[in-house]
Image (cartoon, rainbow, N blue to C red):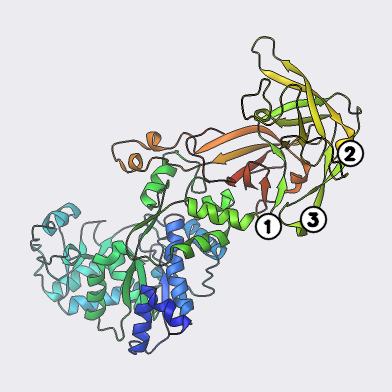
Amino acid sequence: MSDDKAIINGNFIERLIQEDIDNGTFSRPICTRFPPEPNGYLHIGSAYAIYTNYMAAQKFNGTFHLRFDDTNPLKEDIEYVNAIIEDINWLGYNPGDRIFYGSDYSDEIFNAAITLINKGKAYVCDLTPEEITEYRGTLTEPGKDSPYRNRTIDENLELFLKMRNGEFPTASKVLRAKIDMNSPNIKLRDPVLYRIIHAHHYRTGNEWCIYPMYDFAHPIQDAMEDITHSLCSIEFKDHRPLYEWVLNELEIDEPPKQREFGRVNITGAVTSKRYLRELVAGGYVDGWDDPRLPTIRGLRRRGVTPDSIRKFIGEIGFVRSQSTIDYSLLESILRSELKPKVNSVMAVLNPLKVTITNYEEGKTEFLSIENNAENPDLGTRHVPFSKVIYIEKEDFMEVPVNGFKRLSLNSEVRLKGAYFIKCHEVIKDEKTGEILELRCTYDEQTKSGTGFSGRKVKATIHWVSALHAVRADVHLYDKLFDNEELMKDPEITWSEKINTYSRIIHKNCMIEPSISNAKSDERFQFIRHGYFCLDSYSTDDNFIFNRIVALKDSWKGKKV
C-alpha cells in the first residue's frame, strides 16, 4: 500500500472522496466550499471547518471556494464579510479569486422555486411561524397538513409572484416544499423555502423582499459552482435528505454530495455564534477580538500564530462525531513553535525597587545578554544596567521559608547577565509594613561573561534598570470558563460562569528598553512569565502586552 493510500484509508473524508473518484461519480474536478453567514466573526470551530474543506480539495488537486451565505438581510453586514476574508487569508487558507456570494444567485434560486411550484412540489402557505411549528409535530407525533397545502399550481404561482413584487407584509406568507408531513425526519415536513423580509440587503439593496432559506439555497449554490463535496459539521446530518431532495427535484446532473464531519469544541470556551454574540452584546467581554474568546480575531490579538492554529487543527484530524479538545494542546503547540524563535526579554510585573549602594551614581553600562539561550543564531542584545533597578516582589523574602532560593536579607543572588548582589537593608512603610525598597551591594568581580568561577549562588533572577525601563500594562489570560459543568448550566448567568482569573492586569510593569520598538505581530518570551505580544490597541503612550501562553500548563484559578 502506498503512503497516499495509507493516509486515505485512515481518513474517512478522504476515503469517501477517493471512492467517488474511483467510481467515476463526477466528470469534473473535486471542488469543496466553506459557506459562512456574514453575521459574526470566525472562531476556532470555523477554522476547523475551513481546514476540512480546504485540505480535502488540496489532497485531490481540486479547488476550494469561499461562499458567503448572505440570504438574511436582517443580520448580515459588509464588516463581517471583510473580516472573514481577512481571517481566512491570515489562517493560510487563501481562496484566491474563488470568493462567491449566495446573493449573486438570487435569480437562479428564485427560478428554481418556480420550477418546484410548476411541478406541484411547493406551495404558498399563510400560516404564522408559530402555527407552522405547531403543525410540524414532534419527534414522536406526526405533523398535519397546512390548510393551504392543496392550492393549485396557478394560485401558488400568482401568490409567489406577488410575494416577489412586495405585495405582502413581512412574515405574512412563506413558500414551503411539499414533501411529507408524516416523515420521521422533521426537516422533511414541508420545510420553508422562502420567506418575506422587507429590509435593505448590504449587496442587493432593496431589489428583493423575499429571501431563500439556507437549506434551499445551499444545494442550488453548490450545484451552480460545480461543488462536488459539500463538507459540513455533524449538526447538518438531518438536513442532508432535504439537500438531496432539492437537487433531485431540480434534476441536477451529477449532483454534489453533502457529507458531515464532527464538530469541534474547545475546553474553557464557547464556539456557538449565538453564545459569542451574547457575550459581546452583553459586555461580558471587550468585543469580538477579546483575547479570551476563541474567535480568530481574539486569538490573533492575543498573539496566537496561524501556524499554531493549523498545527492544532492538523493534530485533531478529521473526526466523525462531536469532540471536545483540551485547550492545553494548542498551548503545547504554541510553546514548541515560539521557544526556538523568539527573543527573551526581562520584564518585571510586580516591581520592587532595589538600590545598589556601592554602584557609581549616574553610571550606566550595557551588558551583553543572549536573545535566546537555546538558539545562539538569534544573537545578543545590550541591556542597560544602573544604580537603581527593579526586581519582582516575589523574588525577595525577608525571612525565607524552607526551600526559598531567591533574594533575602543578608543573602546573595545573581542578576541575569549581570552581577551578584547582596541585600543588607529593607526599607518599609512605617504604617503598613509594606516593603518599599531594598538596599544592596554588588560584587564587581562577579560580572557575567568574565569567567568568574568563585562562590556559588542558589538562584539567578531577572531585573530591569529603573532609569531605562519601559512602563507597560501586562495582561495575563486563562480560560474564560474554568468549570465545564457550570458553563453548560442554562440557569446560571454569564457573570457567574466566567472565570474570575480569566484576565489579570498588571499595571506599570517595568520592561527592558529593547521592547520599545515592538510591533503588534512581534512575539517575545518574558523570562519566567511566558510568551507575549504587543496588543494591537497599544499606543506610543500606553504599551499593553498580552500573554499568549505561559511557560508551563495553564494555571487554573491561581492569581499570578
Distance (Cα) linking label 2 and label 3: 19 Å
The amino acid type of the residue labelled 3 equals Gly
Distance (Cα) linking label 3 and label 1: 12 Å
Res. 212 in view: no
Element type at mark 3: loop
- Which numbered disc, 2 or 3, marks the residue that appears first in the sequence? 2
Say which quarter of the image contains residue 413: top right
Q: Which residue is mark 1?
A: 341
The x and y percentages for residue 259 are: 32, 72
Comparing 294 with 78, the one in front is: 294
Is 384 positioned to the left or the right of 33 in the image? right
Is 447 positioned to the left or the right of 77 in the image? right
The x and y percentages for residue 485 are: 33, 41
Q: How many marks?
A: 3
> Dot 1: within a 10 Å radius of its alpha carbon, few (fewer than 14), some, or many (20 or more) residues?
some
Q: Which residue is mark 3?
A: 379
Q: Which residue is mark 2?
A: 365
Comparing 511 with 371, the one in front is: 371
